[in-house]
Image (spheres, coloured by chain):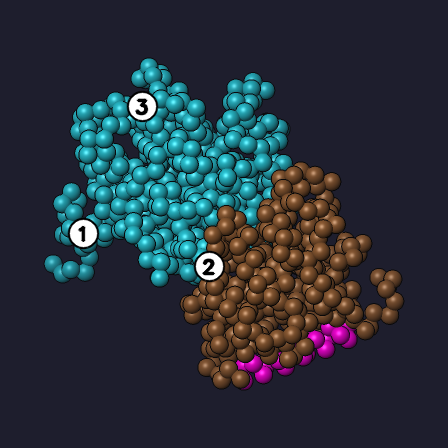
Amino acid sequence: MSETERGREGERTDRTTADGQFGRYGGQYVPEALMPALEELEDAYERYVLENEDGFMDEFERRIRDFGGRPTPLGRADRLSERYDSEIYLKREDLVHGGAHKLNNALGQVLLAKYMGKERVIAETGAGQHGTATAMAAAHLDMPCEVYMGRTDVNRQRPNVFRMRINGAEVNPVDIGRGTLKEAISETMREWSRTVERTHYVIGSVVGPHPFPAMVRDFQAVISEEAREQAREQLGSLPDAVVSCAGGGSNTMGAFHHFVPDDSVDLYAVEAGGSSLEVDEEAGVAPNSATLSTGDEGVLHGARTTLLQDSDGQIMESHSVSAGLDYSGVGPELAHLVDEGRVTPVTVDDTAALEAFHRLSTDEGIIPALETSHAFGYLHEAFESGEDLGETVVVNVSGRGDKDLETVIEETEKRGLESAPDMSVFETGGGI
Amino acid sequence: MGDDAADAAGASGSADSRTGTDATATAFDGGGAFVPYLAVGDPTYEASLEYVEALARGGADLIELGLPFSEPMAEGPTIQGAVTRALEAGMTPDRFFEFVSELDVDVPLVCMTYYNLIYQYGSSDGPRSFVERAAEVGLEGFVVPDLPAEEAGPLREACDEFGLDLIFIVAPTTRGDRLERMMERVSGYVYVQARLGATGAREDVSDQTGESLERLADWEIPKAVGFGIKTGEHAERIAAAGADGIIVGSALVDIVAEGHEDDRPVEETADRLAEKARELKAGATRGAESLPEPEHP
């Protein structure tokens, strides 16, 4: 019970709202067949997550510690601090089991599915990190698991496909549209409406219909809960800024949540600028995933939020070198915090993200995910351009980059980046 | 019951103001109504005109016209294919309205689309511009698969203003309060989803249909059953189970898709659609006539 009082009561009061509205965003725009499942989930979320019924949160906290490896450290980045003449601290979500923050949410939801008496879980995945985390959590909790993944992403994130299969999950490639996260979510929603009575949909980000955005945020909020405490202990004060990459926004909301009431802490959501912020309306393509920076209000995948869309309301295909940021929508709460001026959205393009990837790898000995590299790209651009982020900055290292090595080597070579190591001598099939 | 939802939606009208157009409800008079669906603009604007007119010739009592949306969350592969073809051929909301104006048919027309297209249209903040334009071109109502009753307040309000119907889908999972909430807001007819899942033609017709119709027995509004109806025999069974009408989409879209893939002349595909329509209409009529006594279980 003391567990409940400690964390959960506080969270309940700072939920933006109980009905899934974040300002003008949020809601439940889904087929009628799914509405009873959402009502059931709302009820389970309130009882188990918010009220710790049957000791759900106690079990979650125990498992995310013993299985997940929490708490993760907040560590000073010495070389970056020197480079930027500031105090740069890294919140190490790359050290969570599986190599990304994704397990925080996946473990929470798979456990919740068990408490709800569901027989199987399904999930969508973009970069494969959420699918991997769900497959691990499902194996850990003995639940059958099926993952839907766009064909393009299957091809560019093969190591994660293998990890999911090895953990015993089915992986279903989705051959619709451009075959990325957007199509994977649509297909998982369809599968959910076929099997809703016995299946829980473990959504991978703070997107989708209520209660998903609030619930996923609550499972991820452990990031800022720890970071805030660690900053006070280690620095004696709160940081001046928190920087986090943003695709759907789950690591972003997790890293921001407990800092939102701290007005002295600036919050930067770094979006994928892709190859350009210009939009090709004719082709229906936005060569970026900068939803918060360039999108406008609409309804997609169950929520009213900010979207990349054409003037008719057709959803545009997004682009990013990073599969995990490659999405045309964003979580409704994050869209709201941007509207309110609480969160500042910024963008970093593909090339700057790749450069940041190499910089962190050689400076700090941490190979970041390409998603995470965007946050470091912004850190670099801000300090280079003389923008004042403050004396102490926390960057959320949302995940590790092992899954991205093939992409990085290929994209780095294509661009002839000087910061990258020369790999040509290792190329296979090149003769002697 | 459902007070919270009514407040949240802020609809101006109450249940008794749900008049909509008489045309949609009367299309079901006598039972055995045949309601086909096609995605407008599949595979081209011109061919699509011929196809919809063929369905009317084949005995359609009301036609659901799909305005293609890039993320058709509730559709199976067949209708996703249609939507993709139509979008690639340049279908837009404005072209859709043009299409409806140009269409030469005698039956009520209902627009089926996703909420984002309704929401983004025109200059209004919200669905009003779309509904106004729909009323101008002679549409009688809307089916919006991603808009549950809870979120439908603004659209319901606009429909009331322009006298159009808002049709809701009742799923096999819809029960109790939800059903009542929905029935307070629906007008025209209810779309009874025969089974769980996305749209698509099936060999079997689900038992869930009978159960769903039973749950709706007390509501006087016409009940049209869709999802999975493929043949005249299916249509007959569904109508005999007490449905006032049958909705058929994928089985018709399949014919359009085949015509497109095999490069058949438009007239030939149109004839095949008309023939399929006659089969389905005849089945629905037989089913309706077979109802010996209303009390029959």
First reached walking from the N terminus: tag 1 or tag 3: 3
Would you say residue A183 is visible in this rendering?
no
Viewed as shown, does residue B144 lie left or right of A336?
A: right
Would you say residue A235 is visible in this rendering?
yes
Chain letter for mark 1:
A
Q: Quadrant of residue B281?
A: bottom right
Q: Give the residue type that dot 2 points to.
A: Ser
As drawn, which residue projects farthest toward the left?
Answer: A432
Badge 3 crowding class, 10 Å Cα cut-off, few under 14, some 14 to 19, many 20 or more, is some
Chain letter for mark 2:
B
Name the spot of residue A151 as percent of width and height, x first.
40, 58
Q: Quadrant of residue A153?
A: bottom left
In this view, B109 is above or below A249: below
Badge 2 crowding class, 10 Å Cα cut-off, few under 14, some 14 to 19, many 20 or more, is some
Q: Main secondary structure of the magenta part?
A: helix
Q: Which mark is residue A415?
A: 1
Name the spot of residue A204 as percent of width and height, x first.
46, 43
Q: Magenta segment, which residues? A: B268-287
**Of residues A28 and A421, the one drawn nearer to the viewer in this rendering:** A28
